[in-house]
């Protein structure tokens, strides 16, 4: 590798790229990173972090309403200031950007501000400088995709929705995935009249069906207006409002429209098309278990490869990649089974393992345990919000193959349950575990009778 300027050249300083750069540098490798936008990538700047901050902000609306039942009375009606939330978020993201910069500097990684272009298997060009590397890692993530329809120039994507100039009193989200349901909940909680439009019969495709239906009902109870089996036909700007015509004949007037319609690999301008690097049918970079593309010296990880588009997955892939290419020991392939995930809609969703539908197909005979209840907090708050907890068990082995929750802090609860599912614990192990009382989470170890088989 000494014949090259660097042992590893990383394109993209997102979560996966930064982790790979730092971890490789710790082995003694000479590493450089090129980033043309912002340190920390999607998650830190226009993804998980600001989204969770906005979700926290939206939950205060419910907290103010719930407080009365516990004897707390505010002297006046709460007033929300969009600019305060937006600008405080900007300050926090700037702080995180600086931390990422220091992490790279401390690790001895050179940071280059600019969009790199791959010239061949071992050379990149950035800011009119040509550099050589034994291995080139593409970790550029995804970019929002907006469908083509008349007036689509009036929509904002998930990169821009955090920084709207004015708060939208009426807000519409197009889409049915994580981002769509999260932002419909967020803006509803912040005080918007929120609409969600989705072309399918129910959002969150791929999640457990009961979880999807339960979430639909809870979001509707909170005021989100759901328009299923519909799409946007056109958008017309009328004075200061947007007139949205739907394919089912409905017309809605709103202040802002978010197109949460998916993200695609951010490969434009990288030069990979000139190298004839193999792509998947979905347009992602095809890689093997060593994260090598069809040009072995060019590696790729994270959202650009089409796997689970989750920050912890990119981090795990980064560390595994370094083990493959910069450590002496050859590791086994990364195990993508039983990856937990959360959706920060209101109420939150947390899930790990197989859905009921997947388990019936994979296991055959199963047992399903369900708890659907009003949390203790709401016996005094007056809220009608309910919580759903669910375990899916392989009947023959008694192993818990799936755990699902819809309710307050579902992600926090399922993170712990995920350890048990990952370890292959049985329903008997859950039953033998003493619960923490009084908590909602104890329901996971007190469900004794199967709800159905």
Image: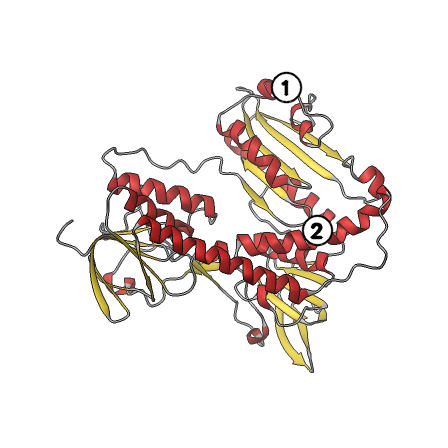
Query: Is disc 2 in contact with disc 1, using a CB cutoff of under 8 Å?
Result: no
Q: Residue 394: x and y, percent?
A: 55, 25
In the picture shown, does residue 395 fall above or below 171?
above
Q: Which residue is mark 1?
A: 431
Q: Residue 436: x and y, percent?
A: 68, 25
| Quarter of the figure with residue 269 | bottom left
In the picture shown, does residue 312 fall above or below 257?
above
In the picture shown, does residue 314 fall above or below 245?
above
Q: Quick one: which residue is furthest to the left in this view? A: 3
- Which residue is drawn at the image coordinates 65% and 19% (left, top)? 434
Q: Quadrant of the C terminus?
A: top right
Q: Quick one: which residue is furthest to the bottom in this view? A: 239
Q: Which residue is mark 2?
A: 59
Left or right of 13, for residue 227: right
Q: Residues within 10 Å of mark 1 (few under 14, many from 20)?
A: some
Q: Residues within 10 Å of mark 2 (few under 14, many from 20)?
A: some
């Amino acid at each position: 590798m000494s014949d090259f300027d660097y042992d590893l050249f990383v394109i993209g300083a997102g979560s996966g790229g930064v982790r790979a750069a730092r971890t490789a540098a710790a082995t003694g490798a000479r590493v450089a990173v090129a980033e043309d936008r912002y340190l920390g990538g999607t998650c830190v700047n226009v993804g998980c972090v600001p989204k969770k901050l906005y979700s926290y902000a939206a939950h205060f609306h419910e907290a103010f309403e719930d407080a009365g039942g516990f004897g707390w009375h505010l002297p006046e009606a709460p007033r929300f200031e969009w600019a305060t939330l937006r600008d405080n978020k900007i300050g926090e993201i700037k702080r995180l950007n600086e931390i990422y910069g220091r992490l790279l500097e401390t690790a001895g990684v050179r940071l280059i501000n600019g969009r790199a272009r791959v010239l061949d298997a071992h050379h990149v060009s950035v800011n009119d400088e040509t550099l050589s590397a034994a291995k080139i890692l593409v970790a550029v993530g995804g970019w929002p995709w907006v469908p083509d329809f008349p007036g689509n120039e009036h929509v904002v994507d998930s990169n821009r929705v955090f920084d709207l100039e004015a708060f939208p009193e009426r807000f519409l989200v197009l889409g049915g995935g994580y981002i769509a349901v999260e932002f419909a909940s967020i803006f509803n909680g912040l005080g918007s009249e929120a609409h969600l439009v989705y072309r399918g019969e129910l959002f969150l495709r791929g999640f457990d069906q009961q979880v999807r239906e339960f979430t639909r009902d809870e979001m509707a109870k909170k005021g989100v207006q759901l328009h299923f089996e519909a799409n946007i036909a056109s958008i017309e700007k009328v004075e200061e409002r947007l007139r949205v015509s739907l394919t089912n004949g409905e017309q809605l007037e709103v202040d802002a429209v978010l197109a949460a319609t998916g993200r695609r690999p951010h490969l434009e301008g990288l030069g990979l098309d000139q190298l004839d690097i193999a792509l998947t049918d979905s347009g992602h970079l095809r890689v093997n278990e060593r994260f090598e593309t069809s040009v072995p010296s060019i590696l790729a990880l994270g959202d650009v490869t089409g796997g689970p588009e989750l920050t912890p997955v990119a981090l795990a892939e980064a560390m595994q990649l370094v083990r493959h290419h910069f450590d002496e020991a050859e590791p086994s392939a990364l195990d993508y089974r039983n990856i937990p995930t959360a959706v920060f809609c209101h109420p939150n969703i947390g899930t790990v393992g197989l859905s009921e539908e997947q388990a019936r197909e994979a296991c055959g005979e199963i047992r399903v345990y369900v708890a659907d209840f009003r949390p203790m907090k709401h016996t005094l708050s007056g809220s009608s919000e309910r919580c759903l907890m669910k375990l899916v068990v392989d009947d023959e082995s008694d192993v818990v193959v799936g755990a699902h929750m819809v309710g307050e802090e579902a992600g926090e609860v399922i993170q712990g349950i995920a350890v048990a599912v990952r370890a292959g614990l049985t329903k008997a192990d859950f039953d033998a575990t003493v619960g923490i009382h009084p908590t909602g989470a104890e329901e996971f170890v007190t469900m004794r009778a199967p709800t159905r088989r």
